[in-house]
Amino acid sequence: MLAVVPRLPSWLLAIPLRSATLPPATHTTCYLLGREQAIVVDPGSAYPGELARLRPAIHRLLGSGGALAAILLTHHHRDHVAGAATLALELRVPVIAHERTLARLALVGVRTRALGEGAQLALEPELALEVLHTPGHAPGHLCLFEPRERVLLGGDMVPGLGTTLVDPGAGEGDLATYLASLERLRALEPALILPAHGPPLAEGEAAIRRLIMHRLWREHRVEGALRLEPRDALALAREAYAELAPWQIGLALRSTLAHLEKLEREGRAAREGERWRRGVRAFR
Ligand SMILES: [Zn+2]
């Protein structure tokens, strides 16, 4: 089968920047949206030289009469925000993000503006982006949706490469919330998804459906690893992620904990100290 290489909309530039992200990804794609009023989304690199790769595009925009309105952050993880303060101060523009993202960042000397569910970003007469609050991967995660061409700027919600880590620890992920946000995005039936990591995804609705199915399949594996006798999460991760290489077990453990917390709330797993066993609902 021929691979579908999606055409990007004319109002958008994708500029992958090398960033401190999780393998197998090595870059965070920074997007420049709009030609009259423009916004930069997720300048996530602090490596010398990487932000410099953005500047020609921004200067071309300014040279052709456009204006840069703001820097938008999809969420607070460092591989999305690392270059934001530098760029905001240099270009004298505010940083806009969800209030739960701004609360987690120390943007010294930078103007900020909170943006939430239902906001509209009107960049051109024919181009208005809808702001969606999609928590789960991070509490303040935002996506942008362009309804005419049905283009979704998905941040870390739908990976183009590797998997999105839903980390219930410091990353503040929540799997049930993540799945609910994915269902919401799927209902938009996006034709094209522009992820923060990896290439664009054509047939976005099908990509989200596959992602949800994969998560539920993994949940089934984690639930299947639970016994009457409690076991620690590492033993469960080794069984539920048996196909992974040993060096990946750390991330698998974080994911396993995310599944266990969801299963616990649903009565399908129970915690005994640091160990987990089957929940009462598992017997029905
Ligand atoms: Zn992230």
Image: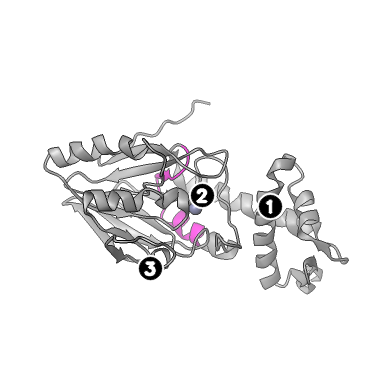
Say what amino acid the circle numbered 2 marks: Ile
The answer to whether residue 31 is seen in the rendering is yes
Scheme of colours in the image = one colour
Q: Earlier in the sequence, mark 2 or mark 3?
A: 3
Q: Amino acid at mark 3?
A: Glu
The image shows residue 177 at horizontal and vertical percentages of: 54, 65
Residue extent of the magenta highlight: 181-198
Provide the residue designation for mark 3: 99
Residue 218 disc label:
1
Q: Residue at x 34, y 40 (%)?
A: 51
User: 217 or 52: which is nearer to us?
Assistant: 52
Amino acid type, label 1: Arg
Asked if 69 appears above or below 64 in the picture, the reply is: below
Q: Position of residue 212 (x, y in %)?
A: 57, 53
Which of the image's four quarters has the C terminus?
bottom right
Q: Is residue 171 left or right of residue 238?
A: left
Label 2 with label 3: CB-CB less than 8 Å: no
Residue 146 seen anywhere in this rendered image of the structure: no
Q: Are marks 3 and 1 in contact (CB under 8 Å)?
A: no
Q: Nearer the viewer, residue 65 or 90?
A: 90
Magenta run includes residue 195: yes
- Residue 208: which numbered mark, if any? 2
Residue 191 in the image, given as x and y percentages of width and height: 39, 44
The reply to whether the magenta stretch includes residue 46 is no
The residues bearing labels 3 and 1 have C-alpha atoms spaced at a distance of: 32 Å
